């Protein structure tokens, strides 16, 4: 490790904090039609080579980062549940060699219902994974086929039950609304089935058609218009609340005490280290991404080969991110925390614009916290973009 | 250079229809006279503004001095004065011509005489210049030099029998042109011993030297230390430097004498002290009367100009002042708009002139501008017997106080091949044109004479003309006078508030159509707000068209995790940047581009 790479920290403060780890597994069985993640299918040799490189990257993590206790660990993708048990064991061993996991750390893994069975889930559980995020998207086979998913509705039901049997007591179901041609009834049906299963957490996203994905250029059944989309969104909140799931972020709902601790790290701008192809990190005032080319990733030998660039965030950058990420959460931001973090009065930086949105009813303030109202959530970007500062 | 031998001086310009090859010919002449090596040659030496190169037209008149050793063995000094070719710039053509004794007329061998060929030739003949033709582009397969020669003789009535046949592009026949200059353009006359009498035909502001005054000396001598007086303004200054025009540079010399073209500087800081068209004489020994100057032309097209960033108002003022120094035809005065803040009402010779000024302000002065709908000068006769000249629609008096209104009418000449006469006549009809006559130049070409309201041609008439004639029609016009017309002011209301910058005067018959179009276009240009926003067009308080912008329902990113943050932040930055460019009218945020876009689109085909 070259000493010039060491990220700046605020008076060493970042070093005292615990850390979140994200591990990227960029392989899947088949690319879904809406997916714009850095992922794709590959043979088992390619996967093995990748895991070898990942182990190398893990071993190279600078000491000042590696020594921080890890509070949350998240295996994302791609489809990390494609990993065999021994592959995960290999990774966990590499991680435990380099890092120390806190007692009670949240260890999550994304699971595609078409890629795991009871035995595999038991193995994952044994290796320490204690939370699964199951990519259900829909229980409706027609909708799943349109999305290009590799599984059917019944696979999701099966995997959920198997996860319970394997000992997982913290499960998330990912669902997707506003699909082309999706009726409000179909969406409500999906929600009801999900609630009937009784997971601890539900993520419900409106489909976003990203540029460059097959969806962007396909002839699709009509998408719900904005009015319908918003109606579905509001109904989602009501239905889930009636089953005991409270919205805590724009698209995330949980039973009390089950908000995803890992994802909250992103929204509260605390430090996270992303390992694996293209993974992003925020350490202190530095943001850096791992290389995005598989060839470069496999060829990397030094820490700085994996992370050739880093961006030093200015305090303005961090104020902006604190605001627009914090406002994603229904509890919003703590005004006092802004001043603790940045040593400057919130009023001075954002008083005027916040006042405007409070007046328009897009923001509310309670108990020292500033948060988006229901109407504000619908047009969050409109509000958040005002927290981008003039330079 | 103190050779006072007038015999060996030739002051001339080149006139042509646009794209007939004037600038290329000028370049070749500069090359052939050996002042520049080929390496030094920029593609088009005389056109040194980027803008001109892009548009292929020459805007500012400039001059260059060439030394030519003729076949007769004598060395001649040529002063080649460049002139603009577009109808909007007739005034500048005029002042350039005033510095010359003759003109080369360039005619394209493939196109023959075009509308601006005629316009420019007539301007030159009016100034008593000797004009000789050259036929260019003879290298092209479609060249018809003989037919063009006949056309020149028949239509213009000047001798074309021995007109040089050239290709400026290929460098063919350039020597012949240079020899023709020596033979056919008269040497200047004038008395070097008489009191100084010099015409200011152009000027340029230089931050070190002050105003650089371009002069053509009729009589007398001017040198460093001369005390000279500007006859119209009365300003008296001491000359610091005199010189002539090298290609793209000023070259100081000892003196300039009768018949010569050159420049002087005199630490003149106030641009108004050296007015183009004024006569310079000696302070001690003034000439008895000034040269016949030429009046500043009246601006024909007006619009409001506002800085997108209101903090840059002073910069806009400075920039306009600087441009005005080199362009006396540019008019401006401060005005205020509720929608756009502080700005200027600016007057231009025509729409091209306006576009050129706008682009120069944006490029050379790095200003981000919003312009309001261009309009013409209307005469408003009030019931109390007074008349106002209306340049800003916002100032239109209440209808009850108006007796009648008049609008400017131009006489237009449209030269067109016969197959397109139908479509062009239809276009003129649509633009409220009054047909006057058709004149056949030859079997396949004709000149259509129409009277057209100026406000019908200032938007996009030229483009429409080109598109309906597959590029073959050419067009020229001059102001004919004012005629009574049924005119109304159209107001555009956004969220029930009139937006003054979008008001315009329109003929009553076309009001509904334009109002409807404006509303439709604004609907597309104004982003959705937190509430429904009605867009209305009104004439005299009566709503004639309406659209509604539905409120913003959804604007949210469903997902944002660690890997998404930089990308999502860029989206928010872009959104914020958009907001910065918004102008709040009433309580509606309107992007500044919307003003421009709506007005541009308003021209409608």
Image (cartoon, coloured by chain):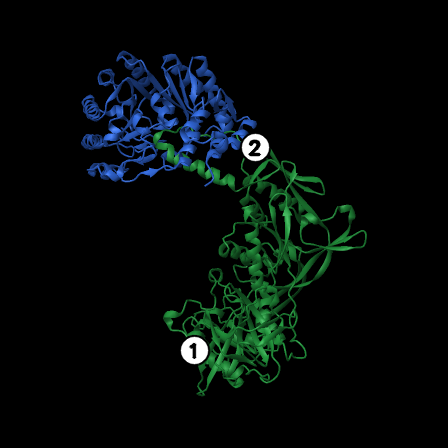
Chain colours: A blue, B green
Q: Find the residue positioned furthest to the right.
A: B384
Q: Is residue B175 left or right of residue B499?
A: left
Q: Is residue A377 left or right of residue B330?
A: left
How many labels, in total? 2
Quarter of the image with the N terminus of chain A in it? top left
Tell which of B71 and B99 is nearer to you. Answer: B99
Residue A206 in the image: state x and y as whole percent.
Answer: 43, 26
Closest to the observer, B601 or B436: B601
**Chain letter of disc 2?**
B
Q: Residue furthest bottom?
A: B72
Residue B588 visible in the current orientation: yes
Q: Position of residue B250 (x, y in %)?
A: 47, 71
Residue A275 left/right relative to B602: left
Nearer the observer, A253 or B480: A253
- The quarter holding residue A340 reads top left
Residue indicated by mark 2:
B550
Frontmost residue, B57 versus B46: B46
**Residue holding disc 1:** B33
Percent x, y for residue B96? 57, 71
At numbered mark 2, what does the secondary structure look like: helix, strand or loop? loop
Q: Residue at x 26, y 32 (%)?
A: A276
Task: Give the CA distance from mark 2 to mark 1.
Answer: 68 Å
Q: Is residue B357 above or below residue B529?
A: below
């Amino acid at each position: 490790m070259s000493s010039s790479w060491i990220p700046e920290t605020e008076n060493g403060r970042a070093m005292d904090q615990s850390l979140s780890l994200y591990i990227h597994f960029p392989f899947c069985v088949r690319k879904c039609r809406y997916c714009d993640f850095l992922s794709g299918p590959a043979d088992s040799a390619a996967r093995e080579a990748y895991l070898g490189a990942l182990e190398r990257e893990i071993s190279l993590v600078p000491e000042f980062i590696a020594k921080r206790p890890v509070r949350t660990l998240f295996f994302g993708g791609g489809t990390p549940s494609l990993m065999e048990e021994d592959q995960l064991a290999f990774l966990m061993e590499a991680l435990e060699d380099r890092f120390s996991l806190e007692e009670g750390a949240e260890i999550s893994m994304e699971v595609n219902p078409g890629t795991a069975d009871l035995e595999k889930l038991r193995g994952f559980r044994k290796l320490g994974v204690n939370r699964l995020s199951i990519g259900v998207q829909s229980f409706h086979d027609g909708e799943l086929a349109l999305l290009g998913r590799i599984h059917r509705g019944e696979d999701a039901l099966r995997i959920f039950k198997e996860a319970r049997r394997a000992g997982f007591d913290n499960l998330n179901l990912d669902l997707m609304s506003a699909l082309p041609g999706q009726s409000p009834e179909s969406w409500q049906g999906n929600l009801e089935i999900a609630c009937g299963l009784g997971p601890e957490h539900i993520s419900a996203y409106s489909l976003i058609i990203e540029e460059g994905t097959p969806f962007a250029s396909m002839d699709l059944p009509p998408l719900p218009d904005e009015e319908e989309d918003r109606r579905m969104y509001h109904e989602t909140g009501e239905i889930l609340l009636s089953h005991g799931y409270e919205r805590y972020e724009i698209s995330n709902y949980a039973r009390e005490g089950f908000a995803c601790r890992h994802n909250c790290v992103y929204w509260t701008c605390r430090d996270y280290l992303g390992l694996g192809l293209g993974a992003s990190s925020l350490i202190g005032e530095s943001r850096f991404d791992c290389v995005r080319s598989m060839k470069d990733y496999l060829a990397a030998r030094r820490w700085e080969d994996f992370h050739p660039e880093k961006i030093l965030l200015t305090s303005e950058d961090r104020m902006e991110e604190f605001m627009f990420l914090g406002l994603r959460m229904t509890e919003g931001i703590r005004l006092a925390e802004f001043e603790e973090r940045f040593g400057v009065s919130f009023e001075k930086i954002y008083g005027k614009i916040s006042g405007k949105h409070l007046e328009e009813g897009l923001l509310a303030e309670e108990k020292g916290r500033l948060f988006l109202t229901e109407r504000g959530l619908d047009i969050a970007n409109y509000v958040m973009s005002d927290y981008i500062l003039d330079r | 250079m103190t050779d006072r031998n007038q015999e060996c001086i030739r002051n001339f310009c080149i006139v042509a229809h646009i794209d007939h090859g004037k600038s290329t010919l000028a370049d070749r002449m500069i090359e052939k006279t050996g002042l520049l090596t080929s390496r030094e040659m920029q593609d088009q030496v005389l056109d040194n503004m980027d803008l001109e190169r892009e548009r292929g037209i020459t805007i500012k008149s400039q001059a260059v001095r060439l030394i030519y050793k003729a076949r007769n063995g004598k060395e001649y000094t040529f002063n080649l004065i460049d002139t603009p070719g577009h109808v909007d710039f007739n005034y500048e053509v005029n002042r350039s011509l005033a510095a010359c004794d003759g003109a080369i007329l360039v005619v394209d061998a493939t196109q023959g005489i075009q509308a601006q060929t005629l316009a420019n030739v007539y301007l030159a003949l009016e100034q008593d210049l000797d004009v000789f033709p050259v036929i260019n582009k003879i290298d092209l397969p479609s060249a018809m030099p003989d037919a063009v020669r006949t056309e020149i003789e028949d239509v213009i009535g000047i001798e074309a029998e021995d007109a040089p046949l050239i290709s400026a592009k290929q460098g063919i026949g350039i020597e012949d042109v240079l020899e023709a200059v020596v033979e056919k353009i008269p040497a200047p006359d004038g008395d070097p011993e008489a009191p100084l009498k010099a015409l200011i035909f152009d000027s340029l502001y230089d931050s070190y030297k002050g105003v650089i005054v371009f002069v053509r000396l009729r009589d007398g001598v001017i040198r460093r230390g001369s005390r000279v007086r500007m006859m119209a303004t009365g300003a008296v200054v001491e000359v610091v430097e005199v010189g002539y025009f090298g290609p793209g540079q000023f070259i100081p010399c000892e003196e300039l004498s009768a018949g010569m073209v050159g420049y002087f500087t005199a630490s003149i800081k106030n641009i108004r002290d050296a007015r183009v068209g004024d006569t310079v004489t000696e302070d001690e020994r003034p000439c008895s009367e000034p040269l016949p100057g030429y009046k500043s032309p009246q601006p024909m097209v007006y619009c409001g100009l506002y800085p997108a960033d209101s903090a840059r108002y002073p910069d806009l003022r400075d920039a306009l002042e600087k441009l005005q120094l080199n362009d006396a035809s540019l008019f401006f005065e401060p005005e205020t708009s509720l929608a756009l803040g502080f700005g200027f009402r600016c007057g231009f010779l025509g729409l091209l002139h306006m576009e050129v000024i706008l682009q120069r302000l944006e490029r050379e002065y790095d200003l981000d501008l919003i312009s309001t709908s261009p309009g013409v000068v209307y005469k408003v006769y009030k019931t109390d017997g007074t008349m106002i000249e209306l340049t800003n629609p916002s100032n239109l008096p209440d209808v009850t106080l108006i007796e009648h209104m008049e609008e400017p009418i131009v006489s237009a000449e449209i030269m067109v091949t016969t197959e397109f006469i139908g479509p062009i006549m239809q276009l003129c009809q649509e633009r409220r044109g009054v047909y006057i006559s058709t004149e056949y130049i030859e079997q396949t070409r004709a000149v259509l004479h129409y009277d057209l309201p100026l406000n019908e041609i200032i938007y996009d008439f030229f483009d429409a003309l080109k598109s309906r004639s597959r590029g073959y029609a050419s067009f020229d016009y001059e102001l004919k006078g004012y005629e009574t017309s049924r005119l109304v002011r159209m107001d555009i209301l956004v969220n029930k508030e009139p937006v003054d910058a979008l008001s315009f005067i329109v003929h009553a018959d076309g009001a509904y159509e334009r109002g409807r179009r404006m509303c439709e276009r604004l609907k597309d240009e104004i982003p959705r707000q937190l509430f429904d926003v009605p867009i209305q067009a009104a004439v005299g308080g009566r709503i004639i068209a309406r659209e509604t912008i539905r409120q913003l329902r959804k604007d949210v990113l469903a997902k944002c995790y660690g890997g998404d943050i930089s990308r999502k932040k860029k989206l928010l930055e872009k959104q914020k940047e958009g907001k910065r460019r918004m102008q709040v009218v009433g309580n509606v945020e309107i992007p500044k581009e919307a003003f421009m876009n709506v007005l541009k689109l308003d021209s409608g085909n």
